[in-house]
Image: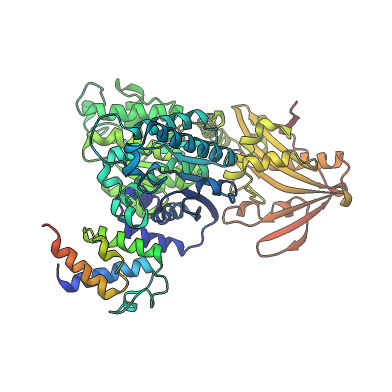
């Protein structure tokens, strides 16, 4: 999957989970800038990301996923490690 | 598409559910439905799924969670809920219990069992007035494929027996093992999320769980379906009536025909359980009549078919007509057809109808119908429900009779309608509450009293609940009207708290006769004045001017409700000569 598509897809998922529009999500959107981002939605986000990309996000990364940029890198890495 | 979207719940991704839930939450729903979930694990994702599901049936969901790990404590102080769901998970009764369970001594094991039993007793005792779902205990999350007898199996077996033995009628046990069996452990549990968040179940499981309790949710919300309508060709039999003549197959001894035979058999047994069976097909009606009266293999008899729309009109027109003639909502109809085109047409034009296509793999057809029946129909009907099929059929006959009269009153006379009124009759409570929950159209205040509330009202000395049985020349129609009166002795006034009639008895001036009766009753009790209120809902437009038409005068009026008053001594009785009224003894 192209990096651009991945980025678009992540933004789409985040926009659904946090109920905001795509345009409101930029590189440093985080728990601090997105009002709806609470612990329950964090769980919803992880579930949706794993389901949509068909990946499993490692334990140690889950706690770090607090802004868009980190999420993007974690997903890219998980996609690379995915057994084809 | 909402009904059809909910049908596909298990196939939707979690993201789709989130998206649709947000979308549905934008439109205001008419009624609240409150579910309290008591659990000792994290279950937050089920909230979105339940919300989505209830919203797709036009309910406004309120999903509350008890405090984490506080199941028993929470039962002492539970808020108003339509349904309480208990997830008591052995895996989390203590830290790492799933790892240490097998290492416990016999004494420790017995101690765990005793502690759980105490919890069960308290849960059942404290929730005895609620509608409760309790999941059975399961040994599935305890890993390992060793088949030796394990401590955990012993605990699970004993506790499940205990639950079964102690449960009260308000409790329904949910066998979650059926879902785990179907999905397999790996897809049922998410141990990573359990480790991180104590969230044990996968989304896959939770989607299956919500569709598994669908019938219970629909029962409590009064949204169970009522009618199963079939297309004919390639839906009730293989082949096309009229074209291939005798090539039509529905024989139990034919490899393909047997599936249609089974579907017909299922339809017959559903009809016996009160489900209304009907036809909606594009054929010449003689061809279809011919099959039902002559074909040797046909299983569905004319007795089972409540309504037949066999003509060349479009299916959505016909389904709309069926809904009107049977006096049921479009959202009470399930429609089955083999044509993709017809199914899509119905989905597009009548989104409330659940439209199902005959599967391409015909072997799956009977199973699909059985599954649909289990999810959407009332398979444990009471006597009233069973009478309904007969009533609807009688109604069709009544309508035929009606066309041969020009004056409505002279037609009504031939019906020999009789009303039997009971006062504060406690055996009627379940039916009274059922009517209060379900009646939308002829309902002046739409108060939705539960059984417990009706029971409390009946015991109040200043309240009188009248329940009305209706009979006519075609047979009994059951309890189909309720009036609740509240007295204000100091004001010499009686107030009509509720006044409602079931759809099945409308159009025969019963409401006028019943109002006469109510007024006579209040007068006999020494009251001078009656107060009544009309509370507007989306569906009760037909009674907007009920009080205006019946000699009441307006007192106060707002956008949502109007209050009326009537001076009893000036009331002119209608004394309809075609309806007789009896007091039940």
Is residue B313 something that shows in the picture? Answer: no
Q: Can you say which quadrant of the picture contains the C terminus of chain A?
A: bottom left
Q: Nearer the viewer, residue A81 or B6?
A: A81
Q: Can you say which quadrant of the picture contains the N terminus of chain A?
A: bottom left
Residue B156, relative to residue B312: is it above or below?
above
Residue B340: percent from left, percent from top: 26, 47
Tell me the residue at 27%/42% (across/down): B185
Residue B462: percent from left, percent from top: 80, 43
Question: Relative to B488, is A79 on the left or the right?
Answer: left
Q: Residue B298 sits in which quadrant? A: top left
Q: How many marks?
A: 0
Q: Nearer the viewer, residue B396 or A23?
A: A23
Residue B149, relative to residue B124: is it above or below?
above
Question: Relative to B176, is B219 on the left or the right?
Answer: right
- Colour scheme of this structure image? rainbow
Q: Nearer the viewer, residue A76 or B474?
A: A76
Residue B75: percent from left, percent from top: 56, 46
Question: Relative to B558, is B103 on the left or the right?
Answer: left
Tell me the residue at 39%/47% (across/down): B92
Tell me the residue at 41%/46% (across/down): B94
Is residue B397 something that shows in the picture? Answer: yes
Residue A78: percent from left, percent from top: 18, 64
Q: Residue B503 sits in which quadrant? A: top right
């Amino acid at each position: 999957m192209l990096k651009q598509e991945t980025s678009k897809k992540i933004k789409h998922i985040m926009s659904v989970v946090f109920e905001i529009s795509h345009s409101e999500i930029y590189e440093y959107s985080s728990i601090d800038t997105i009002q709806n981002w609470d612990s329950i939605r964090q769980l919803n986000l992880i579930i949706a990301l794993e389901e949509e990309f068909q990946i499993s996000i490692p334990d140690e990364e889950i706690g770090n996923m607090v802004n868009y940029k980190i999420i993007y890198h974690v997903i890219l890495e998980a996609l690379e490690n995915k057994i084809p | 598409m909402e009904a059809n979207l909910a049908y596909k719940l298990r196939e939707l991704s979690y993201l789709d559910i989130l998206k649709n839930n947000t979308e549905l939450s934008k439109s205001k729903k008419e009624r609240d439905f409150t579910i309290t979930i008591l659990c000792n694990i994290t279950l937050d994702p089920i909230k979105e799924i339940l919300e989505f599901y209830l919203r797709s049936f036009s309910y406004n969901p309120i999903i509350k969670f008890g405090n984490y790990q506080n199941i028993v404590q929470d039962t002492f102080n539970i808020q108003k809920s339509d349904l309480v769901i208990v997830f008591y998970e052995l895996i989390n009764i203590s830290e790492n219990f799933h790892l240490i369970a097998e290492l416990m001594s016999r004494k420790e094991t017995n101690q765990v069992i005793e502690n759980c039993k105490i919890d069960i007793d308290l849960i059942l005792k404290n929730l005895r007035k609620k509608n409760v779902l309790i999941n059975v205990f399961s040994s599935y999350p305890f890993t390992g494929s060793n088949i030796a007898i394990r401590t955990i199996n012993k605990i699970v077996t004993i506790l499940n027996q205990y639950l079964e033995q102690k449960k009260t009628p308000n409790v329904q046990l949910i066998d979650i093992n059926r879902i785990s069996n179907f999905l397999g452990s790996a897809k049922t549990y998410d141990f990573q999320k359990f480790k991180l968040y104590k969230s044990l179940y996968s989304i896959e499981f939770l989607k299956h769980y919500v569709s598994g309790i669908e019938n219970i949710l629909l029962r409590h919300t009064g949204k169970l379906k009522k009618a199963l309508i079939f297309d004919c060709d390639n839906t009730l039999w293989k082949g096309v009536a009229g074209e291939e003549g005798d090539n039509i197959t529905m024989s139990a001894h034919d490899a393909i025909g047997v599936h249609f035979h089974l579907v017909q058999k299922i339809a017959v047994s559903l009809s016996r359980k009160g489900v209304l069976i009907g036809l909606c097909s594009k054929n010449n009606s003689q061809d279809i009549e011919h099959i039902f009266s002559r074909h040797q293999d046909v299983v569905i008899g004319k007795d089972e078919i409540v309504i037949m729309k066999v003509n060349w009109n479009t299916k959505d027109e016909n389904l709309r007509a069926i809904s009107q003639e049977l006096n049921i909502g479009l959202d009470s109809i399930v429609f089955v057809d083999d044509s993709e085109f017809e199914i899509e047409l119905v989905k597009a034009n009548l989104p409330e109808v659940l439209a199902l296509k005959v599967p391409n793999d015909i072997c799956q057809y009977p199973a699909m119908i059985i599954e649909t029946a289990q999810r959407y129909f009332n398979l444990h009907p009471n006597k009233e429900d069973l009478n309904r099929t007969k009533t609807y059929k009688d109604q069709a006959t009544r309508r035929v009779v009606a066309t041969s009269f020009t004056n409505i009153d002279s037609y009504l006379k031939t019906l020999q309608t009789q009303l039997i009124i009971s006062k504060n009759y406690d055996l009627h409570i379940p039916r009274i509450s059922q009517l209060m929950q379900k009646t939308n159209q002829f309902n002046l205040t739409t108060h939705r009293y539960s059984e417990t509330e009706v029971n409390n009202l009946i015991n109040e000395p200043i309240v009188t609940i009248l329940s009305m049985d209706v009979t006519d020349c075609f047979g009994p129609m059951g309890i189909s009207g309720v009036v609740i009166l509240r007295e204000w002795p100091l004001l010499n006034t009686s107030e009509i708290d509720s006044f409602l009639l079931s759809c099945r008895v409308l159009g025969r001036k019963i409401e006028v006769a019943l109002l006469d009766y109510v007024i006579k009753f209040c007068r006999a009790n020494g009251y001078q004045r009656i107060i009544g209120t009309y509370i507007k809902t989306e569906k009760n437009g037909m009674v907007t001017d009920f009080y205006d038409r019946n000699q009441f005068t307006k007192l106060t009026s707002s956008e949502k409700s109007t209050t009326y008053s009537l001076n009893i001594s000036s009331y002119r009785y209608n004394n309809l000569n075609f309806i007789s009224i009896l007091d039940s003894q």
